[in-house]
Image (cartoon, helix red, strand yellow):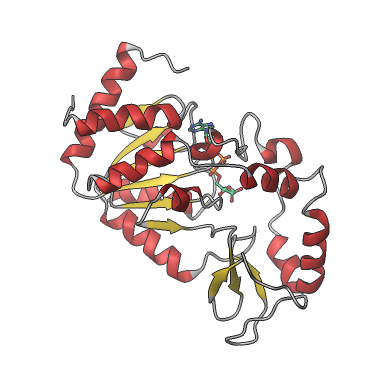
Amino acid sequence: MLELTARLSACLDDAAAVILRSKHVVALAGAGLSVESGIPPFRGPGGLWTKYGEPTNLSYREFIRDPGQWWEDRFRNEDRPGDPTYELKVAVDQAKPNLGHHALVEMEELGLLKCVVTQNVDNLHGEAGSRSLLEIHGNRTWLRCVDCGVRQPRDGYHFDSLPPRCTECGGVIKMDTVMFGEPIPEDVLLASREQAETCDCMLLVGTSGTVNPAARLPLVAKELGAKLIEINPGETALTHACDITLNGPSGELLPLLLIRLKNGEGG
Ligand code: APR
């Protein structure tokens, strides 16, 4: 349980005041936001890459080399313990949005949050009800054609043959989740960059700030005069650039921030 010290309470007041004065607040979400939903992060304590090692940047090239084999391995490994794919699948399959996700939804409904740019593929923002949402690393519940980019839900899709082929253009279909070494789809990259260039305040929620292009977005926003507010139990690669840092779990800090916003409180 988070200890609400006088200092933390004052930082929460300051953060609420900045948000209430801002016209276009954007949240950049990372894996830390889903930790309280039971999903391990990638780096830091309990991180999947900490445990299994960071994947190489060759994942996408391996997929493109033999997509049929990739899908066969995927179906075979999906239920096999001992690798990050399996561990992440088990955790995400049983995860539900936590109070942090719900607080972001309420901030949006209050008109205090214009967009969530998330690096998470777990679909929890959508389940919680976020409407203005950019999933810069894709979404595990969707499939995407490598050639024409058309997306479709994974649920109900019949994998009659491998690799699955796009009915629109005949291209190879992959998971919508962006792989290491895969270019971020142009549409979501441009939209995310536009949010960074438009916002006057960006909340950095549960991200280590180590993976580009997402990690560059806060710096783009700052260069254009935006205030940065970080919510994270620990220090990150972006802490130095932040105007306010709230140290603690987002599932507890975001609801505390929301209370101040609803009361119109600020420092
Ligand atoms: N609340 C908020 N933040 C938390 C919590 C919590 N309860 N628990 C951990 N964190 C923080 C950690 O301190 C860390 O800074 O969440 C961050 C998680 O960092 P990463 O695991 O690196 O996650 P992220 O920044 O989203 O990674 C970016 O890397 O491997 C790729 O595609 C993957 O989207 C991911 C990207």
Total number of numbered discs in the rendering = 0
Q: Is residue 232 above or below residue 144?
A: above
Q: Is residue 41 above or below residue 263?
A: below
- On the image, the x and y values in percent for residue 102 come to 39, 40
- Which residue, as the protein is rendered here, is positioned at the far front? 156
Q: Residue at x 58, y 42 (%)?
A: 95
- On the image, the x and y values in percent for residue 91 come to 65, 42
The residue nearer to you, when weighing 150 against 238, is: 150
Q: Is residue 235 above or below residue 53?
A: above
Q: In the drawing, does residue 180 fall left or right of residue 99?
A: right
Q: Residue at x 48, y 26 (%)?
A: 233
In which image quadrant can residue 180 be found? bottom right
In which image quadrant can residue 9 be found? top left
Q: Residue at x 78, y 66 (%)?
A: 70
The residue nearer to you, when weighing 58 against 249, is: 249
Q: Residue at x 77, y 67 (%)?
A: 71
Q: In the drawing, does residue 229 fall left or right of residue 128?
A: left
Q: In the drawing, does residue 229 fall left or right of residue 261?
A: right
**In what quadrant of the picture does the C terminus appear?**
top left
Q: Is residue 88 above or below residue 9?
A: below
In which image quadrant can residue 188 be found? bottom left
Q: Quadrant of ligand 1?
A: top right
- On the image, the x and y values in percent for residue 109 come to 27, 47
- On the image, the x and y values in percent for residue 156 come to 63, 68
